[in-house]
Image (spheres, grey):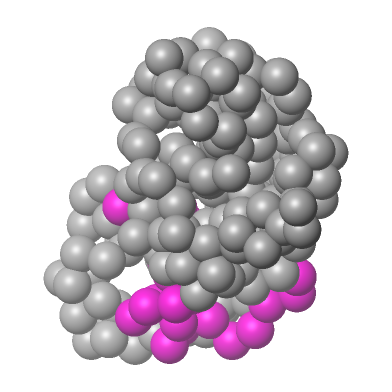
Amino acid sequence: MRLVLASASPARLSVLRGAGVEPIVQVSGVDEDALTEALGPSASPETVVTELARAKAAAVAETFTDSTQDLVIVGCDSMLSIGGELHGKPHSVEVARERWQSMAGNSGELLTGHAVLRVTAGVVVAQAAAHSSTVVHFATPSSVDLEAYLASGEPLLVAGAFTLDGLGGWFVDRIEGDPSSVIGIGLPLVRTLLNRVGTSLAELWGRASS
């Protein structure tokens, strides 16, 4: 049994490797903005991140239709809900700076959608999806430190314009919830979803009994 990570995130890859799983990395190519817009303004934040995760996993599953391997494909998507607004990746220094003006000294809810698809002989035979929620309490960085952080480029391509496991960790006072979920892939929730599709950690570790 192999795990396929439907993400280019080095942080998610690092979490899985640290947890004893060496995944196959296959980027989905899903247009996140287009899908979010298609869901409409009435879609809840929880629905948005979960459907994005599901779409990423499904897109990657289509690339394995000729595979003879037993696979579990994991898709994830994270966004920060703060002040009633849902924020993904800022992509620019200007947007990231604006985000931090509202985040500094405040708290936000980091939502991460997870979807797990089990694929046997190229066919999706089981799937499960859910989201996790973690409250993040942000510090107030000095203007000098914030500008240095923005100049590093790190916050531009991560949900909420911050990381917990990188430079951004300096500006997180505390969290309430699962730290791995804040990094991008919640191990407790993924374990639950793996069980729902009939897969064990022992199989992914290569230690399942015969």
- All told, the count of numbered labels is 0
At horizontal 44% and vertical 77% (from top left) the residue drawn is 165
Residue 151: in sight, yes or no? yes
Q: Position of residue 54 (x, y in %)?
A: 60, 27
At horizontal 58% and vertical 33% (from top left) the residue drawn is 70
The vertical placement of 143 against 192, above or below, is below
Quadrant location of residue 25? top left
Magenta region, residue range: 157-177
Q: Is residue 149 left or right of residue 105?
A: left
Q: Is residue 116 left or right of residue 160?
A: right
Quadrant location of residue 155? bottom left
At horizontal 34% and vertical 60% (from top left) the residue drawn is 10
Q: Position of residue 199 (x, y in %)?
A: 74, 44
Q: Is residue 202 magenta?
A: no
Q: Position of residue 164 (x, y in %)?
A: 49, 75
Q: Is residue 171 magenta?
A: yes
Q: Position of residue 48 (x, y in %)?
A: 63, 30
Q: Is residue 42 left or right of residue 104?
A: right
Name the foreground residue: 26 vs 46.
26
The vertical placement of 191 against 152, above or below, is above
Name the foreground residue: 156 vs 202.
202
